[in-house]
Image (cartoon, rainbow, N blue to C red):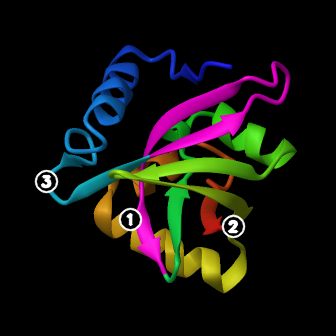
Amino acid sequence: MSVVDSPVGWVNEHIRQYVETDGAQGHEWRPGVYTLLLTVKGRRSGEPRRTALIYQPYEDSYVVVASHGGAPRDPAWYRNLQDDPTAEVQVGAERFRATARTATGAERARLWDLMNEVWPDYADYQTKTDREIPVVVLDRT
């Protein structure tokens, strides 16, 4: 089964370059801002869906933010993970399986601050929506 990449044009191109170069292009998206590729199973289609996300390492895991630019709804990849938390992750050339969990409480606060250090726009996105933007930990399995 082939992977369905993001329907957003520039994200789709970013993913294509990342995959074709094993992360040599695309892993560092902007100076000091790194991205990973997250592949999850579509909750309705069952097809693998892939997107690129800003991340930060956290212990032996990785952290991503389900901001959706501050949209009223969580992004599709996050809703898919709520249905099935298993994922494939690519960081640079490394690929591995992971289980996703949503950080809560003090851990969420600490990781929210960590992610805002690398991408300060997350704080602005939070002001645009009534939902608490999820912070997701991808634990290796």
**What residue is drawn where x is 57% and y is 77%?**
109
Give how far apart the Cα atoms at labels 1 and 3 are. 15 Å
Q: Is residue 57 left or right of residue 26?
A: right
Location of mark 1 (residue): 116
Where 61 falls versus 99 (above or below)? below
Is residue 47 a member of the stretch shown in magenta? yes
Residues shaded magenta? 37-58
The amino acid on which the numbered mark 3 sits, given as a three-letter code, is Pro
Residue 1 picture location, percent across and down: 68, 19
The amino acid on which the numbered mark 1 sits, given as a three-letter code, is Asn
Dot 3 or dot 2, earlier in sequence: 3
Graded by Cα atoms within 10 Å as few (under 14), some (14 to 19) or many (20 or more), the crowding at tag 1 reads: some
Dot 1 or dot 3, earlier in sequence: 3
Graded by Cα atoms within 10 Å as few (under 14), some (14 to 19) or many (20 or more), the crowding at tag 3 reads: few
Location of mark 3 (residue): 31
**What residue is drawn where x is 69% and y is 67%?**
141
Residue 8: numbered disc: none
The amino acid on which the numbered mark 2 sits, given as a three-letter code, is Thr
Examine the image and state in which quarter residue 96 appears: bottom right
* Magenta span main SS: strand
Residue 58 picture location, percent across and down: 48, 77
- Count of marks placed on residues: 3
Cβ atoms under marks 1 and 2 closer than 8 Å: no
Graded by Cα atoms within 10 Å as few (under 14), some (14 to 19) or many (20 or more), the crowding at tag 2 reads: few
The answer to which of 49 and 125 lies nearer the viewer is: 49
Location of mark 2 (residue): 141
